[in-house]
Image (cartoon, rainbow, N blue to C red):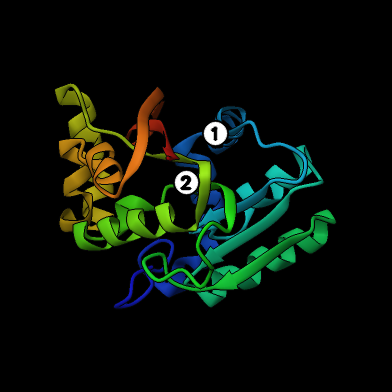
Amino acid sequence: MSSDRYVPALGFERLTRLYDPVLRLTTRETTFRRRLLDQAQLRPGDSVLDLGCGTGTLAVAATEREPRLEMVGIDGDPAMLQRARAKAAAAGAHVDFDEGLSDALPYAESSFDAVLSSLFFHHVTRAVKERTAREIARVLRPGGTLHVLDWGRPRDPLTRARFLGVQLFDGFETTRDTVTGALPQILAGAGLADVREHGRLQAAFGVLNFWSARRS
């Protein structure tokens, strides 16, 4: 999901229909989604952006937990958004889904109280990560928070070996920053404050990390 071209969820458009079952099988999705929403502590009336929302699972779960959110999901893949809208309709969830790119968000400055991002950053290059982080800082309101779940830096040989499966599928260039643990520095470099790690979760292909940051 970059200014060059969005990234299909599993790398190839023909695999989009498999996205939800693959995620459930390989990432402990129910657990990470619950923990990320616990971390975000969204409040009634908050305006929230789910960045790289995919099929809308996180956005729908957020509104089920707190129905009075002003929830927006954005993704560059129209096929994923079609599934997201159908999922929200089936759940009776009010979510506005927009087609757009992470490094050129179609929202005014200070539009959101919180931004959520799950399993997005490892899909894009360093330059797109940096532009995306600056866009997040721009659309957050002062004091607004970012909450990220993504693959974390492998800290032992076994975890590093398992993460090779992600790299082979998603590409070595886009996942290089994951291996080096660069995402917190990228977020701080975009002007976001209080970048913190909130824990780790073992998954099939490595370890998932939870981070937060804040717009000053």
Q: Position of residue 88 (x, y in %)?
A: 75, 59
Q: Earlier in the sequence, mark 1 or mark 2?
A: 1
Compared across the picture, whether 33 is left or right of 10 comes to right
In the rendered image, the vertical position of residue 29 relative to residue 101, given as above or below: above
Disc number for residue 118:
2
Compared across the picture, whether 165 is left or right of 22 comes to left
In the rendered image, the vertical position of residue 105 relative to residue 94, given as above or below: below
Disc number for residue 135:
none
Q: What residue is pinned by disc 1?
A: 36
Q: Residue at x 27, y 63 (%)?
A: 128
Quick check: marks 1 and 2 in contact, CB under 8 Å? yes
Q: Position of residue 146 (x, y in %)?
A: 47, 42
Q: Secondary structure at mark 2?
A: strand
- Say which amino acid is labelled 2: Ser
Q: Quadrant of residue 39?
A: top right
Q: Quadrant of residue 214?
A: top left
Category of crowding for the residue at label 2, using alpha-carbon neighbours closer than 10 angstroms: few (below 14), some (14–19), many (at least 20): many
